[in-house]
Image (tube, helix red, strand yellow):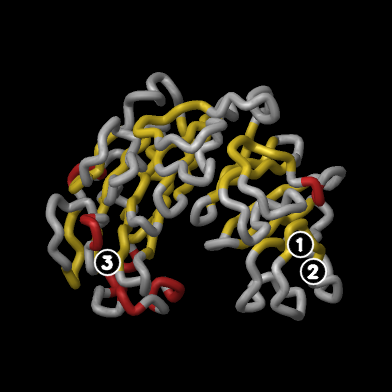
């Protein structure tokens, strides 16, 4: 609860409500929107409601929690937010719900109409059990328990990995030769880029690469997944993407960064962009 109280959006909520929260997702340009799942499996939203991302059926802002009826008692286990903005939720049964801005088909429902309430994604994910989702600014990824990656939405830079730059309004499995036979365990998105980590610790990236955020040794966009060359021979265990930079953690506890560095976000001691992963924090010891 102490961590939640650090967010101003929760400052007006009473302690009884705060201690009942099981999952919280804070988003928006200033952390001014939130969706929470309670221990009783109810879902509430509050905040500015940009592009109807609160999922309550309208575009009205609210300072106090409103129930998101479409997700209550669905046992939501995780949420992801894209800055477009749009939101994805995954249930324990592996169902995906989406809502919010949809100008590029990032909701995966076959059209480009804005979603006012969470709706299940059926086309493309039929009979699939999803356990993780990730959002770029206007594209989405889903990872199934079988280790398959599905992608949809905006594709101007190849971020959905289909080999072209056509937008995709329903989920499509990424069948590229390089990851089509791999079992993927983790997915992540930058603004217009995507990454996937295999269960063997191999890292792959695709999409926009103007700042080197794919880590493939150049600044060229990639329309299909490519291996992150600087980590070949390294067993990667965790990945995360910022707006235009990336981080990876190895099984040896080493931290690697690459991509945009205008604000020193790579931790290298300078502001030079990097096109390949670079080990940092050598004086900090093992990272977990």
User: For mark 1, what is the residue?
Assistant: 255
| Residue closer to the observer: 78 or 14 | 78
For image coordinates 15% across by 59% down, the residue present is 59
Q: CA distance from mark 2 to mark 1?
A: 6 Å
Q: Secondary structure at mark 2?
A: strand
Q: Is residue 107 above or below residue 14?
A: above
Quarter in which the C terminus is drawn: bottom right
| Residue closer to the observer: 236 or 20 | 236
Q: Secondary structure at mark 3?
A: helix
> Residue 72 appears at what percent x and percent y?
24, 44
Q: CA distance from mark 1 to mark 3?
A: 37 Å
For image coordinates 37% across by 44% down, the residue present is 89
> Residue 25 appears at what percent x and percent y?
39, 59
Q: Is residue 173 left or right of residue 279?
A: left
Name the mark on residue 240.
none
Q: CA distance from mark 2 to mark 3?
A: 41 Å
Question: For residue 244, which quarter of the picture?
Answer: bottom right
Q: Is residue 121 above or below residue 10?
A: above
| Residue closer to the observer: 27 or 213 | 213
User: For mark 3, what is the residue?
Assistant: 17
């Amino acid at each position: 609860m102490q961590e939640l109280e650090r967010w101003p959006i929760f400052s007006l909520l009473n302690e009884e409500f705060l201690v009942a929260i099981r999952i919280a997702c804070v988003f928006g340009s200033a952390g001014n929107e939130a969706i929470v799942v309670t221990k009783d499996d109810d879902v509430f939203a509050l905040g500015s409601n940009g592009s109807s991302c609160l999922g309550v059926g309208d575009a009205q802002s609210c300072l106090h929690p409103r129930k998101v009826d479409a997700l209550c008692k669905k046992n939501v286990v995780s949420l992801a937010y894209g800055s477009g903005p749009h939101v994805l939720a995954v249930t324990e049964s592996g169902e995906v719900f989406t809502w919010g801005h949809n100008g590029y088909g990032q909701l995966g429902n076959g059209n480009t109409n804005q979603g006012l309430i969470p709706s299940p994604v059926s086309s493309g994910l039929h009979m699939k059990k999803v356990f993780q989702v990730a959002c770029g600014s206007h594209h989405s990824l889903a990872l199934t328990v079988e280790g398959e990656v599905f992608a949809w939405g905006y594709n101007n830079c190849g971020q959905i990995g289909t080999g072209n730059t056509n937008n995709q309004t329903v989920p499509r499995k990424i069948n590229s030769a390089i990851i089509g036979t791999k079992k993927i365990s983790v997915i992540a998105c930058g603004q217009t880029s995507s990454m996937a980590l295999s269960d063997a610790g191999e890292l792959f990236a695709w999409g926009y690469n103007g700042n080197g955020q794919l880590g493939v040794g150049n600044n060229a966009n990639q329309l299909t997944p490519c291996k992150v060359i600087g980590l070949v021979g390294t067993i990667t265990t965790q990945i995360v993407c910022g707006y235009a930079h990336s981080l990876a953690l190895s099984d040896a506890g080493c931290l690697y960064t690459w991509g945009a560095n205008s604000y020193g976000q790579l931790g290298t001691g300078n502001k030079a962009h990097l096109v390949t992963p670079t080990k940092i924090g050598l004086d900090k010891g093992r990272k977990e």
